[in-house]
Amino acid sequence: MSRIIPEPVVPSVLRDRIQAVDLLRGLTIAAMILVNNPGTWSAIYAPFEHAPWHGYTPTDLIFPFFLFIVGCSIAFAYRTKSPGGATYRKIVVRSLKLIGLGIFLGAFLIAPPFVKAWEAIRLPGVLQRIGLVFLLAAPLALHLRTRPLIVLTLVLLLGYWIWMGFVPLPDGSAPNYERAPNNWAMYVDKLLLGTHTWQEDYDPEGLLSTLPSLATCLIGVITGRFLLENTVDKTRKLLLASAGLLVLGHLWGLVFPINKALWTSSFVLVTAGWALLALAVIYYLSDVRGLVWGRVFTYAGANALALYFLSSFFAKVFGLIRVGDTSLHGWIYQTVYDHDFLPDKLSSLLYALTLVVIYLAVGTLLYRRRIFIKV
């Protein structure tokens, strides 16, 4: 008979330091760097690509995982804080910093005039979405208990479904979930953002789809609060919640397709289900069994947003610097990795893995020097 190891009751002095969340944050930022930095975009293994439209791949899980972890972190950081001017100022300042850094990444050039023309600047983006979601989620976590947060999350998901699927557009046409002008998310982005989007007709981090991405973060807040509870058997409960969300998400996907670009409500449930599954496994290994593993990811997670910004910044710089008829990025890839004896996709992956190792090393160095960059 197998021996059942009881889960420990978390002492109050340790409840704000759940190892599993730190590990999952580091693993997620490593995955973000991996999928964003292939040697060449023309040679990528299928799991490292986004779904063309409906459906999802492992890569489509990464950004929702990070927003989920942001929610967990909000639960830990704001559980003892009281609403007030100083707290709100910190929330607003941090949100504006994230939004500003994201816009900077999309706007800067390394040669005069050093900034793109205004009409060519993309205003949405990953850091911008994190900033907006944090700006909304942190005050909600300050003011609402868990049950109202659950109700609000359901309202956001159901309301988004009704808006996207049943509300006629201003011209009277029926909405749909395809990449078309009568898709509400695309309509709102085109109306409010104009040319400041990733594609001419839409942006995967657009304005309307920020509402369901807030729901992703709030599920993280709810999960974080659960982890802080003075209770046992957390792994089993996380697994049950994971299974429930995965089943509900896929069933909902039959009528409201799972789609990252639109951040559909079914996508929220499915990705949150996978996040809970990953968290449950890591929690059991690290916080229940006490296994010491993956410290490098914990170190990286302590400066996750700073590492993401640095990786994005240098990726762009390397892409802009010209070396002959290619970029510095292209020259390094062709010189070091692109060889006839290696498959193209493997060469491209090795380049990305090298960058992951470099940034994990940077994260480790920052952690050991007790440098924590608050973005």
Image: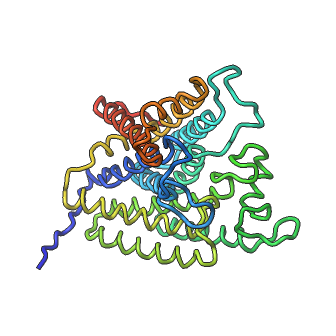
Considering every residue shown, the one lying at the far right of the view is 171
The one of 301 and 33 positioned closer to us in this rendering = 33
The one of 252 and 210 positioned closer to us in this rendering = 252
- Left or right of residue 231, residue 185 in this image: right
Identified at 50% across, 61% down, the residue is 57
- Left or right of residue 204, residue 33 in this image: left
The one of 327 and 200 positioned closer to us in this rendering = 327
Image coords of residue 306 (percent x, y): 46, 36
Q: Is residue 88 above or below residue 57?
A: above
Identified at 63% across, 73% down, the residue is 256
Q: Is residue 164 above or below residue 254?
A: above
Identified at 55% across, 62% down, the residue is 215
Identified at 71% across, 37% down, the residue is 121
Q: Is residue 212 above or below residue 139?
A: below
Considering every residue shown, the one lying at the far top of the view is 112
Image coords of residue 152 (percent x, y): 57, 67
Q: Determine the image quadrant of residue 353.
A: top left
- Left or right of residue 64, residue 350 in this image: left
- Which quadrant does the N terminus fall into? bottom left
Q: Is residue 33 above or below residue 191?
A: above
Which colour style is shown? rainbow
Count of picture labels: 0
Image coords of residue 294 (percent x, y): 27, 48
Image coords of residue 5 (percent x, y): 16, 69
